[in-house]
């Protein structure tokens, strides 16, 4: 397999599909700071992807791709030697691109664009990212979820990624005014902001945190993130540079990666819990949970969002139909009901708490408790579906989920009669 050169002075971001055999899934490698295709190459000449492809379940189910972007310790120098020639060079017509170091946020935009157009045919994407490449991946995922409500990236293997920043980046600033080094610093606002976005995401991929026990660049605490819930952490007998350059299929990182890829294909990777959209704004108009919201004079935008949440919760309940899954869902419904009653009691005793504020407060509680109190044994059930589960409970008249003090069937009948007129 031939790789594009990682050393071209005009090299910009590119996505290379190394194997294209019409598999439904693709493994995408994203290198880190000052990296390139050589990031994944051991000194014996073998590449990371070659080792995982030795597993039949990987080779039969995955294509391989790499995302490469410009990252050098120093920016490419401008050819012009004086101010006049610099200005003139801006207006010259040329097919050449003077690539330069850009920040994590902008690189993630490029990654998102390449995924959208070049990996559109794939059902699922698995990302293996090293170092800064993991921050780029997280930013890309967060943007996709916020913009579309979903992401094709279903599994994320984080190899020595500085989720809390890298201390060596502080020393790098002494030698170079470098946007990527600035982003990687522990005092930069990039990592904290990205972590907060990540924690609040209603949908995110399964994430596996690998760290090197001999890594002097990214310490264990940073490589394993700050997520408050339980994490799958894998210790590797590696340094920062060797963790992405496994020697053989018997290296820890390869054994673990193959295990996760096998689980993905055999388990949750087969379930596509996509975000569902309303067929029309009138969908569910006659449902009890909607009538309860109208009775409470809740804003129409909140009612529309509640319909969308309800639709997605119904979709999830149909997918997780086994007795075991239904038992797990039942436990989740009970905890959501408890959150509701805590807020409803406050509603009854606080004059400032309106029905609209009550609905909004419980929605916020569900999101904030998504990975804590409401953590589910069903990894694909996220905040979006849990909000809908609240309205599923409200839709059952035998359940006491209401948004007003008037909790009567007669009141709902009046609302329905007024809508039918």
Image (cartoon, rainbow, N blue to C red):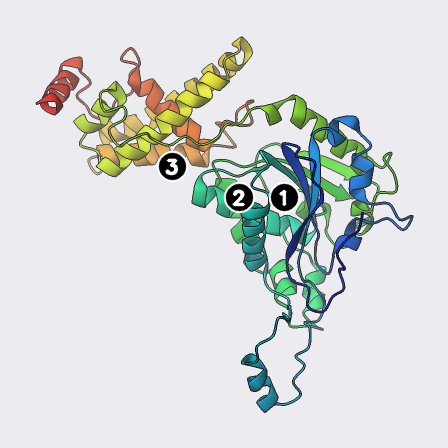
Residue picked out by circle 3 = 364
**Residue 318's disc number:** none
Label 3: few (<14), some (14–19) or many (≥20) C-alpha neighbours in 10 Å? some
Q: Tell me the quarter of the image containing the C terminus.
A: top left
Image height of 263 relative to 215, above or below: above
Q: Residue furthest top?
A: 323
Q: Earlier in the sequence, mark 3 or mark 2?
A: 2
Residue picked out by circle 1 = 225
**Residue 325 in picture, x, y percent from top left:** 53, 15
Image height of 79 relative to 24, above or below: below
**Residue 224 in picture, x, y percent from top left:** 67, 42
Residue 302 in which image quadrant: top left
Label 1: few (<14), some (14–19) or many (≥20) C-alpha neighbours in 10 Å? some
The answer to whether residue 64 is visible is yes
Q: Which residue shows up at 65% across the image and 55% down it?
A: 14
Question: Which residue occupies the foreground of this view, 101 or 159?
Answer: 101
Q: Which residue shows up at 37% across the image and 29% down it?
A: 309
Residue picked out by circle 2 = 198
């Amino acid at each position: 397999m031939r790789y594009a050169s990682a050393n071209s002075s005009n090299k910009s971001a590119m996505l290379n599909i190394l194997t294209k055999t019409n598999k439904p899934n693709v493994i995408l490698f994203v290198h880190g700071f000052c990296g390139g295709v050589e990031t994944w190459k051991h000194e014996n000449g073998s590449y990371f992807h070659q080792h995982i492809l030795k597993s039949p379940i990987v080779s039969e189910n995955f294509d391989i791709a790499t995302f490469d972007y410009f990252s050098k310790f120093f920016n490419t120098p401008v050819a012009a030697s004086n101010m006049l020639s610099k200005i003139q060079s801006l207006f010259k017509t040329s097919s050449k691109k003077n690539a330069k170091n850009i920040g994590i946020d902008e690189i993630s935009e490029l990654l998102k664009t390449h995924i959208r157009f070049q990996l559109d045919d794939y059902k699922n994407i698995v990302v293996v990212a090293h170092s800064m490449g993991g921050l780029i991946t997280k930013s890309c995922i967060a943007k996709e979820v916020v913009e579309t409500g979903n992401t094709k990236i279903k599994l994320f293997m984080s190899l020595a990624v500085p989720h809390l920043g890298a201390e060596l980046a502080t020393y790098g600033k002494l030698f170079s005014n470098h946007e990527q080094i600035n982003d990687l610093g522990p005092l930069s606002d990039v990592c904290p902001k990205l972590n907060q976005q990540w924690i609040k995401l209603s949908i995110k991929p399964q994430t596996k945190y690998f760290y090197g026990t001999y890594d002097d660049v990214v310490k264990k605490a940073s490589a394993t993130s700050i997520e408050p819930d339980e994490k799958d952490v894998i210790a590797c007998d590696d340094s920062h540079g060797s963790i992405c350059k496994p020697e053989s299929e018997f290296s820890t990182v390869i054994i673990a990666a193959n295990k996760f890829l096998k689980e993905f294909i055999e388990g949750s990777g087969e379930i596509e819990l996509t975000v569902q959209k309303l067929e029309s704004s009138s969908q569910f108009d006659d449902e009890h949970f909607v009538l309860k919201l109208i009775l409470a004079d809740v804003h129409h935008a909140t009612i529309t969002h509640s319909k969308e949440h309800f639709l997605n919760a119904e979709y999830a309940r149909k997918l997780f139909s086994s007795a075991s899954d239904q038992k797990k869902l039942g436990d989740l419904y009970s905890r959501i009901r408890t959150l509701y009653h805590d807020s409803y009691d406050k509603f009854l005793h606080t004059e400032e708490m309106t029905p609209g504020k009550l609905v909004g407060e419980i929605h916020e509680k569900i999101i904030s408790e998504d990975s804590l109190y409401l953590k589910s044994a069903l990894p694909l059930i996220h905040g979006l579906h849990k909000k809908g589960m609240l309205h599923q409970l409200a839709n059952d008249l035998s359940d006491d989920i209401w948004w007003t003090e008037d909790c009567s069937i007669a009141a709902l009948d009046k609302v329905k009669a007024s809508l039918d007129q």
